[in-house]
Amino acid sequence: MITLDGEQIEVVDAHSHMGSRNKLAVHQIPRIMKFTAEDMMASMDGAGVDKVVTFAIGAGEPVDYRDTNNYIASSMEKYPDRIIGFMRLNPAKGPKDTLKVLEEGVKLGLKGIKIHPLIEKCPANDKENVYPLMEAAQHHGLPVLFHCGLGEDASPKRIAEVAKDFPKLSVILGHSGVIEGVRDAVDAAKKHENLSMDSSAVGWLPFFCETISWAGVDRVMYGSDHPFNPMEWEVAKIVKHAQKHLKLQIEDLRKIMGGNLKRLLGIS
Ligand SMILES: [Zn+2]
């Protein structure tokens, strides 16, 4: 919980990473090779974050993420009130193998899917490798969070096409397009009801404020991309800095800081 003007706000983070890897991927700094559930608990306690959606840290070599998905599931068992585990999938491994990893993730009780089109070198709307996974996700009622921004394969337009072709699937634009893709992300969210955005790493305050005031308070969810971004920083971006300009009602802030995500995941 965080406290703002004497009001308590529950905080549920929509985007974070755990697990280990052998090689760095996109980010060279910080050089994080491993981040445990205990590290996550310490960060959450320090920032007033109640629950966190978490998935595997991106690997700098082609992996199927099975090992980390297992680690995420066991961490969720260890901290059931605080960790909401998503499975990470690598569509470039091909649909036959990746669907097996997906079904294993369902059996492990994982609650959603993360796909990074740039790290896995696979366009978000790839019909051959991504669409069969989307069919299965829609069937199981699992939301799908795509990294969105910093490259054409992960553009808001490509991800919006997935949302259009799978209208019953909840699709999340991770990072809302970062900076260069933010306006396209807002347009896409306005067009497709099943599309929402997470606030992590949106680096320019005017564009971040646009996501909330143009797409609406129901479509934006607080996320940090921790451990790459500090949670306190991403929390303050919304409740302190954006709030200075937006002057949202406390109930609207509650939606953005956790309520929208809880509704999407069907948890109370
Ligand atoms: Zn991330």
Image (tube, helix red, strand yellow):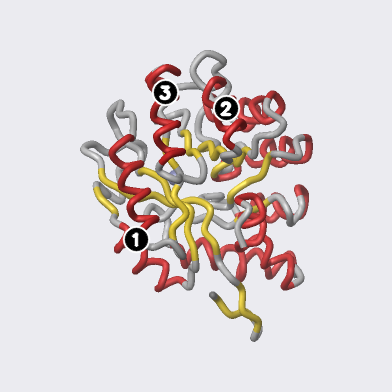
Q: Earlier in the sequence, mark 2 or mark 3?
A: 3
Label 2–label 1 contact, CB within 8 A: no
User: Dot 2 corresponds to which residue?
Assistant: 134
Q: Residue furthest bottom?
A: 6
Could you tell me which secondary element the residue under label 1 belongs to? helix
Residue at image location 62% in from the left, 32% down from the top: 156
Residue at disc 3, secondary structure: loop
- In front of the other: label 1 or label 3? 1
Q: Position of residue 92 (x, y in %)?
A: 41, 20
Residue lying at the far front of the rendered structure = 107
Residue drawn where x is 62% and y is 25% of the image: 158
Residue to which mark 1 is pinned: 78
- Label 2 amino acid? Met
**Residue for point 59% across, 25% down:** 135
Q: Nearer the viewer, mark 2 or mark 3?
A: 2
Q: Is residue 162 left or right of residue 13?
A: right
**Which of disc 3 and disc 1 is earlier in sequence?**
1
Badge count: 3
Q: Which residue is mark 3?
A: 121
